[in-house]
Amino acid sequence: MPKNKKTEWQVGDPAISVVSDQFCNPYPMDLMVKRKVQNFSKDHYQVFDPSGNLLLQIDGQAFGFNRKRAMRDPAGFTILTMRQKGITLKNKWEVHGGESKEKEDLLFTAQQSLAVSLKTSLDVFLAENNNVKKSSTCDFHASGGYSNISFEVFKSDALIAGVGVTHKFTWGSFCKGKYNFRVRVNPEVDYAFIIALLVMVDDNENWC
């Protein structure tokens, strides 16, 4: 878990591919993420590039335990599935490729760093390092949320995404479940992975 922003992922640094290489770009990406509640229990996220092209969409349960979300491409193909695991003091998610829930298709797990905190933070473990009970070093760390007006993802002490997160805030739109994020993803960083973490962090913030 980083204590200071020491470095930032730059052009020429090794690619960080967690979901797929196809989501890694050789230049920084500014993404617009829009959230809208569909009904009492479900919401919908859409992710656009600066030209307004739809890149990703995420559907699933907005409230409750054992939540499940699916990330799809613009054509509706399932890229990954996020599942919240049980009722614990620290929320835990397992993320698998496609619609699978098999161990061999596990991409990563994410768990709250602290049971109680003013700012949501997640420790992220790749599939080969997913035993959060025994491992003391996570592969990535994400923190922030809507109410904190921030979102950052670190690999060790290197910032890989999140600088420049902004949104237009009104209490009316917020409590109707409508709000937007602008997220900066650094070069060669898997933006599908970053968006999955953003949704997890945002889930912990939703109360309207």
Image (tube, grey):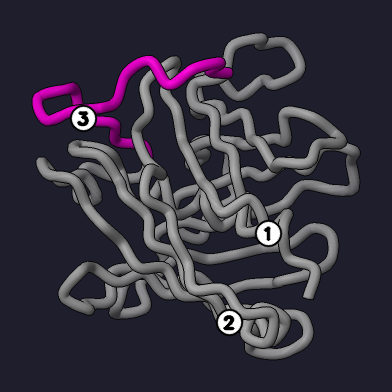
Q: Is residue 13 magenta?
A: yes
Label 2 and label 1: CA atoms lie apart by: 13 Å
| Callouts 2 and 1 close, C-beta under 8 Å | no
- Circle nearer the viewer, 2 or 1: 2
Quadrant where the C terminus is found in the figure: bottom right
- Measured as percent of width and height from the top left, residue 184 is found at 31, 50
- Residue that appears at 10% across and 41% down: 26
Which sits earlier in the primary sequence, circle 2 or circle 1? Answer: 2
In percent of the image, x 29 and y 80: which residue is there?
75
Residue 34 in the image: state x and y as whole percent: 46, 75
Q: Main secondary structure of the magenta part?
A: loop
Give the crowd class for mark 2: few <14, some 14-19, many >=20 residues within 10 Å.
many
Mark 3 belongs to which amino acid? Answer: Ala
Label 1 to label 3: alpha-carbon separation: 27 Å
Residue matched to label 3: 15
- Looking at the rendered structure, the secondary structure element under dot 1 is helix
Secondary structure under badge 3?
loop
Q: Which mark is residue 178?
A: 2
The image shows residue 3, relative to residue 184, as above or below, that is above
Residue identified by numbered label 1: 203
| For marks 3 and 2 on the same chain, the one whose residue lies earlier in the sequence | 3
Residue at image location 69% in from the left, 80% down from the top: 171
- Label of residue 77 in the image: none
Q: In the rendered structure, which segment of residues is drawn in magenta?
A: 1-18
Q: Quadrant of the N terminus?
A: top right
Q: Earlier in the sequence, mark 1 or mark 3?
A: 3
Q: Amino acid at mark 2?
A: Lys
Secondary structure beneath dot 2 equals loop
- Residue 69 left/right relative to 186: right
Snapshot quadrant of residue 173: bottom right
Amino acid type for the residue under numbered disc 1: Asp
